[in-house]
Amino acid sequence: MTLDTAAATEQGTRAARIHTLLALPAGALPLLTFPRVGADWLAWGILVPGLLIIRSAPGARTAAVRGWWFGAGYLLAALYWTIPNIGPGLLLVAAVFGALWAGWGLAAWATLRVPVRPLYALLLVPSTWVAIEYARSWHALGGPWALFGASQWRHPTVLGLAALGGVWLVSFALVAVNTALTIALVAPSARMRALTAALVVGLAGPVSYALRGEPQAVRTIRVTLVQPGVLHDPVTRFAAGERITAAAPPADLVVWGESSVGFDLDRRADLTARLSTLARSSDLLVNEDARDARNRISKSSLLIGPDGIRGRYVKTRLVPFGEYIPFRPVLGWLSSISRAAGEDRVPGTGVRVLQTGGVTIGPLICFESAFPDLGRAVAGRGAQLIVYQSATSTFQGSWAPPQHAALAAVRSAETGRPSVQAALTGVSAGFDARGRSTAWFDTDKRGSVTVTVRVPPATDRTPYDRYGDLVPYLAVALSGFAAARLGYGRLRPRS
């Protein structure tokens, strides 16, 4: 080997390492499409830099590593607000779960390097992405925060795809368009076909939105959302909820946020009586976060009427590290260096629906708005309105509160159900049955906001309600089929 050749090889190796490092910030870029930045239109092309970095990998192994770094960057950016709760544990989460994107890196590299295979790329790259999101959505793996499709929460026409196939179909469409744009950049011979594919996929949401038409409504109700702000003392917080509720305009249902009641109402008849008095004009949905007589802590939605407690739902999906520590014998040390849960809360056994004023509501609590299957579950039980109760006081000043509130828009579009979220510290929000915003009460506001809700029949079903997670199932099947067709030889390094 000549000196010139050795120098060129060393320079190429150095450049490859730099490109690998660049995969980390490239993975962080999609955060710009979520609230608060809210540059959601960028979602249609924001993956292109990462795809180009992966495509330039000299071999399959490097492509997988770049995909891994991309995934780690995505998770670090999307979950940065969890640092108060898990501290350095975030690095562990990003490193472990970022590895899921190694398969995405392989898929992108195998289909986008020369010679580019447009059809395989348009099937395999978005399918692999959706398969990763579906794996991440399992509660045992942490839950589905920052699914790419949720970035489109402000665009009901795009969310027309969510009514067909859930947030998964929106993610598939976004990644497919990013893949098509990458093909158009690197393969001039396939440019027109790629751009045509991008246009067709981009129009699929608005077309499905128009074809579905406006949902039917059987009645209209008024829902008041109470937002007292950051009040750590449970006595002060309870009194603030009372004061705001008493001063609010007439409504059919008043909703307090998560942890609005810091006492066990089964042992505090005096507080139950005060809430029952407030509920004489309208039912009241509060949220209890307290130790019970058996020394256990759960979070519960309690429907209060003039005659006392009418129904209860206990939170089923707990927040990892915030409400329990996964694998506590191994990771329990995190509670000594961060605000991770000192003890595990006790989860409920499943969703419930409650009746108020002739309307069936599906109460869900905080983090549960991230799970598409829970929205489907309460809709399947006849819920006409999905009610979320939340508290994000730990994350005030971060981008977490608006990201959290935005999830309700996606759940509404998926299920064809209006939704409201009462957040103790904001953002309280409301969305109609197509995901259109009806209220947005940000974290800097205190008091209440009243939302007029058009309630659909309990029997209404979207295609996603009926068929569930068919899209991720197909994505997994397509990924396996396309990978098999490409063959092992396609993944071997070029000589």
Image: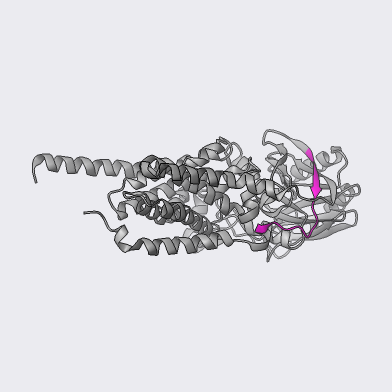
| Residue 277 as seen in the image, left or right of residue 400 | right
Coloring applied to the structure:
one colour
Question: Percent position (x, y) of residue 16?
Answer: 28, 44
Write the start and end of the magenta stretch as one range.
449-464
Instruction: State the residue in front, 152 or 392.
Output: 152
- Is 169 above or below relative to 240? below
Residue 451 forms part of the magenta stretch: yes
Closest to the observer, 328 or 350: 350
Q: Position of residue 153 (x, y in %)?
A: 62, 43
Relative to 139, is 254 above or below? above
* Position in image of residue 426 (x %, y %): 68, 40
The answer, for residue 75, to whether it is visible in the render is yes
Picture coordinates of residue 165, whole percent (x, y): 61, 56
Tell me what residue is drawn at x 74 percent, y 43 percent: 237
114 to the left or right of 12: right
The residue sitting at 75% across, 56% down in the picture is: 362
Q: Nearer the viewer, residue 257 or 204?
A: 204
- The answer to whether 63 appears left or right of 229 in the picture is left
